[in-house]
């Protein structure tokens, strides 16, 4: 049992590790192809629309202002379609 045996063993382990990493990388790449990524998989126009939509948000700050200016009657009965009061 000399130094060259240890070197061979280390080299084998390194090759095995490299092989496993390569397999793992390939697996990840295959998995990526299975995922639906809008930015990549949708036509350019649709991706832009989606970005614009995600930029929109409903701000709660205005809700109270809207309620104050509203001409709706807060005491009104709930509207049920087809029911006549």
Image: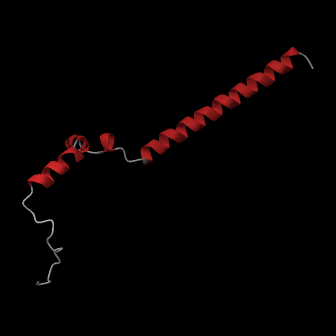
Residue 13 in the image: x percent, y percent?
A: 74, 28
| Front-lying residue, 11 or 57 | 57
Residue 21 in the image: x percent, y percent?
A: 61, 32
Residue 65 sits above or below residue 10 on the image: below
Rendering quarter of residue 9: top right
Q: Is residue 58 visible?
A: no
Residue 70 sits above or below residue 38 on the image: below
Residue 13 sits above or below residue 41 on the image: above
Rendering quarter of residue 77: bottom left
Q: How many marks?
A: 0
Q: Is residue 12 visible?
A: yes
Quadrant housing the N terminus = top right
Kindly identify the residue that appears in the image at 54 percent across and 41 percent down: 27
Snapshot colouring: secondary structure
Kindly identify the residue that appears in the image at 38 percent across and 47 percent down: 36
Q: Report the side of 2 relative to 26 (left or right).
A: right
């Amino acid at each position: 049992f000399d130094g060259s045996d240890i070197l061979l063993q280390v080299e084998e382990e390194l090759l095995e590790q490299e092989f496993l990493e390569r397999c793992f990388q390939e697996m990840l790449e295959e998995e990526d192809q299975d995922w639906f990524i809008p930015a990549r998989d949708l036509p350019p126009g649709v991706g832009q629309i989606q970005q614009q939509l995600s930029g929109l948000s409903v701000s709660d700050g205005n809700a109270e202002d809207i309620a104050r200016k509203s001409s709706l009657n807060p005491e009104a009965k709930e509207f049920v379609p087809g029911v006549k009061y």
